[in-house]
Image: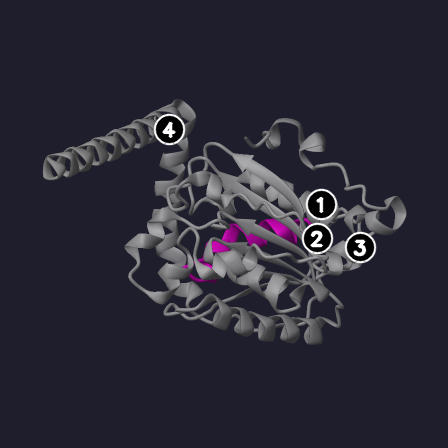
Amino acid sequence: MAFVHAGLDRLATMAAAAQTTALELGRAGAYVARTFCVPAGLRGLAIEWAWAAAHMVVYPAGLLREQLVEPSGYRTDSLPPARRSLMVTDLEAAGTPILLVHGIMDNRSVFTLFRRSLRRRGFGAVHAVNYSLFTGDIRTAAHQLRIHVEQLRELTGADKVHIVGHSLGGMIARYYVQRMGGSAVVDTLVTLGSPHRGTLTAHLMPTPLGRQLRPGSELLEELARPSPGCSTRFLVVWSRLDQMVVPQRNGRLIHPDLDIEELELRDVGHLSMPIDTRTLHWVADALTRSDHRYYRESRGQERPRPLSDTLGETASPAS
């Protein structure tokens, strides 16, 4: 009799697991239909495929290391009238160097249009770096990023820099800022499609890096620890159409000690985030706002008004 009861219990457990799996698959199917099978989603996928093809063309050129050059573009007297009209109004912000950090198995070519857009708006020092295609540890890559940051600061004479990280690049920069004291020299960190709470697709990577990017990993738990002294502002862009960060909501950054502003997109794929016009406009506009540097001193703990309030439909409320 005990054997029969044990068998029935196992069958009940298997049935419950099957029912749970079926419900999850049903929810996933509904999400796919709701997000990918509507006109905006199909348009986003088409742009993603087109940019992927174009990116393959410029990818080889991006393998070459970019040389650091002394910036001069943020001086208005050297700009032609058309470019001068696009000059940012905050000269301090325009003179703050921007470091671009690509994602996994990629290189600086992913920022071709993004960098051009920032320069057209008057940012003078916009530098993209490459790290090894065989990077296997976020902590090691963060140490290398620190070297790049110090080199850029030394060249430009700037006290602080902005960092824009796409995908894995955002996670590397976040580790540097939160766990290695990088917040002392990083004014703003922008992450584009970074798996802040991990991604299920990392289970397809049987490597140490893949294990670090899985939900609940030791590294992600380390990043979730208190960071009371982190003064860097975080600008987080995530998309419900992101096919690399699964579930897509894991692209959100939620941390009680961090100053976070968020842009939610619904129709932009993972690779095409750096070319999305709404992303470009939002990031460029945010980097020229200086109120975040002073709100703690002038208004106590009150946070600056979310950027979505000023951009209307550009940023939709995250749920």
| Front-lying residue, 56 or 223 | 223
Which residue bears the numbered disc 4?
31
Q: Quadrant of residue 27?
A: top left
| Nearer-the-camera pick, 215 or 48 | 215
Q: Earlier in the sequence, mark 3 or mark 4?
A: 4
Residue under the image location 62 percent in, 62 percent down: 178
| Foreground disc of the pair 4, 1 | 4
Q: Nearer the viewer, mark 3 or mark 4?
A: 4
Considering only order in the chain, which callout, 2 or 1, is on the residue closer to the N terminus? 1
Where in the figure is residue 40, as x and y percent of width and height? 43, 26
Within 10 Å of the Cα at label 1, are there few (<14), some (14-19), or many (20+) other Cα atoms?
some
* Labelled pair 1, 2 in contact (Cβ < 8 Å): yes
Secondary structure of the residue carrying tag 2 is loop
Looking at the magenta stretch, what is its main secondary structure? helix
Which residue position is annotated with label 3? Answer: 91
- The residue that mark 1 highlights is 86
Q: Amino acid at mark 1?
A: Leu
The residue indicated by pointer 2 is 122
